[in-house]
Every structure is written in structure tokens, then in C-alpha cells.
Amino acid sequence: MNETERYRFINRDRNWHPKALTPDYKTSIPRSPSQALVSIPQSLSEVTGPDFTHLKFGEHDHDLLLNFNNGGLPIGERIIVHGRVVDQYGNPVKNTLVEMWQANAGGRYRHKNDRYLAPLDPNFGGVGRTLTDANGHYHFRTVKPGPYPWRNGPNDWRPAHIHFSVSGPSISTKLITQLYFEGDPLIPRCPIVQSIANPEAVQTLIARLDMGMANPMDCLAYRFDIVLRGQRKTFFENV
């Protein structure tokens, strides 16, 4: 591959994303635009920085088993989530900030608006962050989140999932997605997942069991690679 091919621009496939209005996903109804979108020029602050290599990270920022420890370990299935952030050609994206947040093992978020009856875990905060290394690798240790009901239909449940944020070289290049777990029967039943018409796009959101990275007698591991743009791109929530 020559340099021209390596850095050639690839148009975004608009069919990859769901329509803004998907009535079975009920909150899309008030959020979908009713008028044509308007393009607004971006300011310098939106297309430059920040440089995350200067961030000061805590020792356990990437370890959700320890970063909210109040005298004990969190309850739930201990897992490792790892992978690489790469561009459309498989080149590593280094020093990129990867943030994640999730519900606890019972399916409840540590958020004031979460009123699900599952209890909060006093030793689990549900958030973590890390920088990718020179080869684009990232790594988290956490507990597997539980599914939870949501007020979309009479008996709709979200599959177990983890939210991911990947920050590119500027504020305007921040991308957000969700990780689901291989084999979860709730994935095809979820109205949010059903809003994605392309089955290949759904597959990019599913983390695969990776026994090679598991810690024997401790943690199972799941691999979730994040691909930016191109034919193998990960599905992102940003349109």
C-alpha cells in the first residue's frame, strides 16, 4: 500500500447509521429533527487539541475493581475488557483517551436519576479511563454489568453493555459507542439495537470471549477492537 492509498479519504456511509426517527425506540421520537439540518462551521477550539498525554492518571483509573474501593471488592463476575483502537487500515491509534462507564452487576448505574430497584454496590463506581499505548492497546478490569428494564415498552430490557468514549485529536472527533457481550440473548430483542438496520454494524458492537487473555481462576476476558472509519469500522452513536 502506497502513502496515497494509506491516507486517502473514505466517505462516510450514511446507510451504516439508523434513521434519526425509529418509533420503536421511543425516545428517538422527540429527539429526531423535524427540519433540515444546518451545517455550522467549527471554531479553532473544536478542531484542535486537547493533548491527553499530559493527563495525570490515578493508579487504578483503568481498574474498576479497585478505583471505588470502600473497604471491599465489588460484587459480580470479574472480567477483563481489552482491545485495540486502530484506523481503517489497521494502524494503531496511540495516546488516545478511552473512557468507559457502566451499570453494576445488578444493572444499576451510580447516577441520581437511576431508580432501578437493584441496590448500589458500595465498592463499585462504574467509570474508568486509560490511554492507548504505542500499539493502540487499551485494557480495563471490571465486573460484568447486569441487564436492566427501561421505560420503552411494557417489558423492554437493555442487554448487558458498557459505554465507550474514544477521544480523537480534537473535541469534534470524540466518538461514543456501546459494547455488548457475545451470546447475550437480549441483544436482538433490544429496540436500540433493532434500530441499526445493517447486521454487520451490530456485529461490530459485540465483544468476543478471549480465553487467551483470561486470568485463570480469576477473570474471563472479552476483546473489543475499535476501528475508526473504513469498511471495518465500529458502529458509533455519533451521526
Image (cartoon, grey):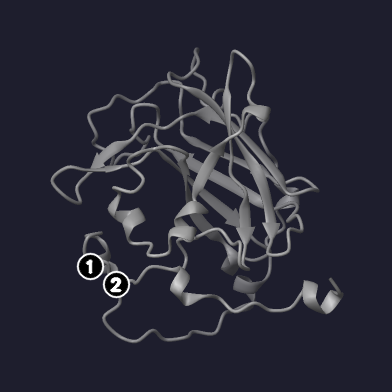
Q: Are the residues flagged by discs 1 and 2 in contact, CB closer than 8 Å?
A: yes
Tell me which amino acid carries mark 2. Answer: Ser
| Residue position for label 1 | 29
191 with respect to 228 (left or right) = left
Q: Residue at x 47, y 41 (%)?
A: 101
Q: Residue at x 36, y 31 (%)?
A: 146
181 with respect to 130 (left or right) = left
Q: On the image, which quarter does residue 24 sit in?
A: bottom left
Rendered view: 185 above or below 93: above
Percent x, y of residue 106: 34, 27
| Residue position for label 2 | 32
Rendered view: 75 above or below 162: above
Rendered view: 69 above or below 112: above
* Disc 1 to disc 2, C-alpha distance: 6 Å
The residue sitting at the right extreme is 2
Q: Quadrant of the N terminus?
A: bottom right
Q: Residue at x 17, y 42 (%)?
A: 155
